[in-house]
Amino acid sequence: MKNAYLFLVVLIVIPSLLLFLNSCSREYSYEGGRQPDSIVVVLPSVAKYTLAGSPNDCSNPVIKGTYTAGTHLTNIHTVTITVNVTSPGSYNLKTDTINGVSFSASGDFTSTGNQTVVLQGAGQPDNPGLFSFTPQVDSSQCSFDIPVQNSEPVATYVLESGGNSQASCIGTVGGTYKAQTALTAANQVSISVYVANVGNYTVQTKKVNGIMFSHTGTFTTIGSQYITLYGSGTPLAAGTFYLVPQIVGPHPLGGQSCGVNVTVQ
């Protein structure tokens, strides 16, 4: 009986001991031997490129879609700009959100040279007017303007011109303009328009020398009449500057724009 018990103990203990020693041997072999190969993570390269037209207006931007205040943008609202790629790779280009709208694009450039990027618009324009957007990559940036028209009913009208020049607005410039002095409500431009159909309208200039003029309203009568554009901004320098009021929105009769000279002291 005693020999049988001893045989049973040996039968259980010896295999367990061998299994333990084999495990230790394999662990020691792994820890003391060649380390496993390192895993190399290859990060995607980022493209190097500049925006055509930088640092001024984007070169020949192609603007698609009609932008209307209070109406959400869809996939048809795009702006195509040109870029010059010096090193292929991934890109992510976007603008700030202005007047409830932004533009963005991402992807990969696979070759160098001039290429186009299609910026997709998103959001809903809050107000009618002419709004400037500036995509930027590193130190390269350019700008494009998006005209946002009024909601219906939209007026049909022209900006009348004549006087000293066929391109000059018929009207007057009011207020005093001084360099580095912000404009006030007294800084106005009054211009003549001819209204064919009543409705909502917006007339605005681009920003020149730090200032611009604009007004949004509703025509309730047809015929010749005057509208007042109100100035905003701060003149950067002294001199005489040419600003161009323009119809923001449809202008089937022509007469979309005219010009005014503003003298800054």
Image: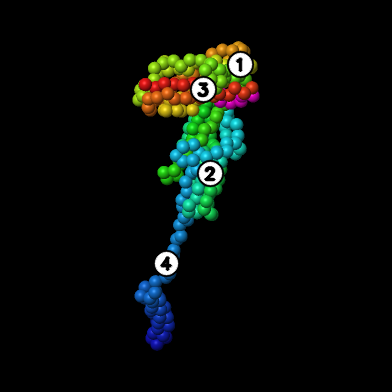
At 48% from the left edge and 54% from the top edge, which residue is drawn? 87
- As helix, strand or loop, the secondary structure at mark 4 comes to loop
Residue 191 versus residue 73 in the image, above or below? above
Mark 1 vs mark 3: in front: 3
What separation in Å lies between label 2 and label 1 (alpha carbons)? 39 Å
Label 2 vs 1, first from the N-terminus? 2
What is the crowding at mark 3: few (fewer than 14 residues within 10 Å), some, or many (at least 20)?
many
Magenta-tinted stretch: 247-252
Is the N terminus in the top left, top right, bottom left or bottom right quadrant? Answer: bottom left
Q: Which residue is mark 2?
A: 82
Q: Which mark is residue 259?
A: 3
Question: Circle 4: is it few (<14), some (14-19), or many (20+) Cα within 10 Å?
Answer: few
The amino acid type, in three-letter code, at marker 2 is: Thr
Name the kind of residue labelled 3 in the image.
Gly
Q: Which mark is residue 112?
A: none
Is there a contact, CB below 8 Å, between mark 2 and mark 4?
no
Q: Which residue is mark 4?
A: 38
Q: Give the mark nearest the N terminus, 1 or 3.
A: 1
Please name which of the two marks, 2 or 3, marks the residue nearer to the observer.
Answer: 3
